[in-house]
Structure formats: C-alpha cells, structure tokens
Amino acid sequence: MEWCVPMPKIELHAHLNGSIRDSTLLELARELGEKGAIVFSDVEHVILKSDRALNEVFKLFDLIHIITTDHKTVARITKEVIEDFAADNVVYLELRTTPKRNDSKAMSKRSYLEAVLEGIRSVNSVEVDLSGELKTDAFAHSHSADGLCNGIGSKIYVRLLLSIDRRETAEAAMETVELAVELQDFGVVGIDLCGNPNVGQWLTFLPALEYAKKQGIPITLHCGEVPNPVEIYAMLDFLPKRIGHACCLEDEDWKLLKRLEIPVEICLTSNIKTETIASTDVHHFADLYKSNHPLILCTDDCGVFSTSLSAEYALASSAFGLGKREMFHLAQKAIDFIFASGRVKKDLKAIFASAHTKLN
Ligand code: 5GP
C-alpha cells in the first residue's frame, strides 16, 4: 500500500510529545543520564517498548515530559515533528500540546507556547503556513499535483490545539483557554481535553470549556476511552466540534453521537496497542464508516505507537477492505472537519482536487 504515502493527508489528532522520534528521545535521555538527572539504562527499554496498556502510556508521558521540558527542547521536537508529518505528505496538521508551567526551567504556559511557535518557525525542510497569511495561489502553485503525488510535500499548513490535561485545576484550564483566545492570530485554532481518562472530573473543566465556546474557540474532547457513561453523555451533550477515540460508548451514546453528527477522530493503532479495542475486527471504524458518520483517521502519538498517518491509512485499507479511491475520499472529507478558516478549507480542496486528477 505504498500509495498511502504520496496521497495528501490531513492530521487532526496528534499530540506533540507523543509524536517525538525515538532517536531524539533516546538522545535526550542519554544527555540527561550523563548529567545524572536520570539513569539512562532504566529508561531506555521503557522508551523502546512498543506495546503498552493505556495506564502505562501515561507513565511513559511522565517520563517524556521529564526528558523534554525546557524551551530549547520543546522548539526542537516541534520542528522535527512537523518535518516528519510533512515528509509523510500531511498537507494540514492540527498539532495539539498541553502548555506547561515548570518553575525549575523558568517556564510558563505562555513561554512553553512561544517555544512551540519558535519550533514551527524554524522548520526549513518544508514551507509552513502558520497563521494563514500566505497567499492561496502561492500555496496551490507549490502543491502541484506532481509535487503531491511524487511523494515530497513542499508545504504544510500547521495549526495548534491547546490541550487541557485532566490532572490540571480549573484555574490552569482557564489559563490555557485564555492563551488560546489570545493566540488565535498565531495559529491556535482550538482546545482539546486530554490526559489519563481515569483521572479528573468533567465538571472541573466545564467552566473553561464553556468560556472557550463563548469565545468561539472550537473544542475537541477525548471521549469514551474508558467506560464512563455519565461523563460520555455529558461530553456529547456539550456538543464539542469533534471527539477523539469514542471506544467505550454504549448503544444510547452511539445513537446520540450519530444524531448529533459529531465527527470522530479515529486512532486505530493507538486503540489497539493500548488494548482499548481488542482488534480492528471489532473496531467502531467499520460501523461509523458504513453509517457515513463523519470520521477522520489520525495517529494520536506516532512516536509512542511507532506509526505514521500513511501507516494508519494502510491499516484501515487492509482491515476494512477499502481501496485507494475510498481512502482518498476519506482523506479529502477531513477538510470539512478542520478548525482552521474557510480560506484554508478552500485551499485544501484545491490541493485534493489537483491530486485527484493525478490519481485518475
Ligand atoms: P503533550 O500535550 O505533552 O504535547 O502530549 C502528551 C500528552 O497528550 C500526554 O501527557 C497526555 O495528556 C495526552 N495524550 C497523548 N495520548 C493520549 C491518549 O491516547 N489519550 C489521552 N486521553 N491523552 C493522551
């Protein structure tokens, strides 16, 4: 299924710190080991292990955050992650990350985001459209059908989603939303609620999420990663613009989700590796796809789960018997669910139309 790679793709559910290259993570861990901050031999196998249950994944994130939390490293990993998505012919990336305060590194949520923005601006292997100021015709020109279908993406739209971690307080969540409101002109297009689904209460985050909604900031929620009918209902009832995962919904929830037509970000490898879903044979992708429900294939954490968006497309194609044409249309349909402006949607439609001509 090599055709999945040159195909233009849209990534809407990718966590920055989950998308770091293994090689970078090992290099950074080795450096910290040399400084005596961690014991490298203790963490090496943790980084390289590929199958982890959901709770183990969150332990790994705690380790990753120890390894990556200083401004220079945040900028570096951001740059690399964008370059990797662009090399996989992702033409539009909504990258999500949790703004972090770390007093020992003189880091505030704001300075964390400044480091992310610096990382985006330092990308040099591909042209990046961050705040939407580039002209449509320049973008369409650089994304000629040849460029897209021959494999090397020459330009990528990047937008940011600011994540609220379920471990955070109501005040910290509100600070994140305030930053999202303030940084709308710098590529921030939405808010995400993420983190260990066994931690924290929906009601803690509701005021911040309601405030975001009032400010017109689109919201996506990690929803139904563990069975929690009360929370799942409350989340759907909140009418987020999208939800991620939706693994543990009950019949009534599926009915509500479908009635409300809330798009679902599907992360196949993540769901299977974390054993949230037993196998692709029983994955809800099949039912949602058959029902024509809005869905978007995503990676979640391509570093942690050793995947790529092309690999997710190849997996869906083989598991659900979908051909090149169906997969192309699935990728194209994702345009409808991005959080960026109508102008960006229009540009992406032109890119896909041009790639479609080439496909035929
Ligand atoms: P960061 O926000 O630090 O850039 O990316 C890592 C964070 O994303 C993790 O600490 C966790 O809060 C969140 N995350 C990554 N993968 C998942 C997932 O599969 N489920 C949930 N609920 N959160 C995740």
Image: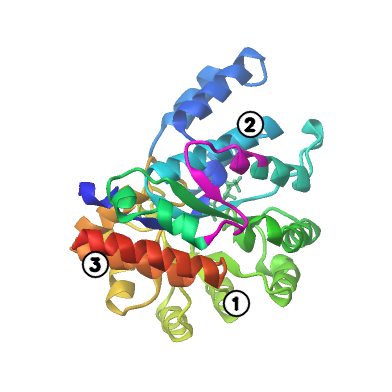
Please identify, in this view, whether the residue under mark 1 or under mark 3 is nearer the observer: 3
Q: Work out whether residue 322 or residue 223 is closer to the camera in this orientation and state it.
A: 322
Q: How many marks?
A: 3
Q: Which mark is residue 73?
A: 2
Q: Which mark is residue 326?
A: 3
Q: Residue at x 57, y 40 (%)?
A: 78
Q: CA distance from mark 1 to mark 3?
A: 33 Å
Horizontal side of residue 288 vs 182, given as left or right: left
Q: Which residue is mark 1?
A: 234
Please identify, in this view, whether the residue under mark 1 or under mark 2 is nearer the observer: 2
**Res. 251 image quadrant:** bottom left
State the extent of the magenta-drawn residues as a range.
118-135
Residue 204 point in image, percent of width and height: 73, 66
Tell me, yes or no, whether the highlighted magenta stretch contains residue 126.
Answer: yes
- 48 to 203, vertically: above or below: above
Q: Work out whether residue 181 or residue 173 is closer to the camera in this orientation and state it.
A: 181
Disc 1 or 3, which lies upstream in sequence? 1
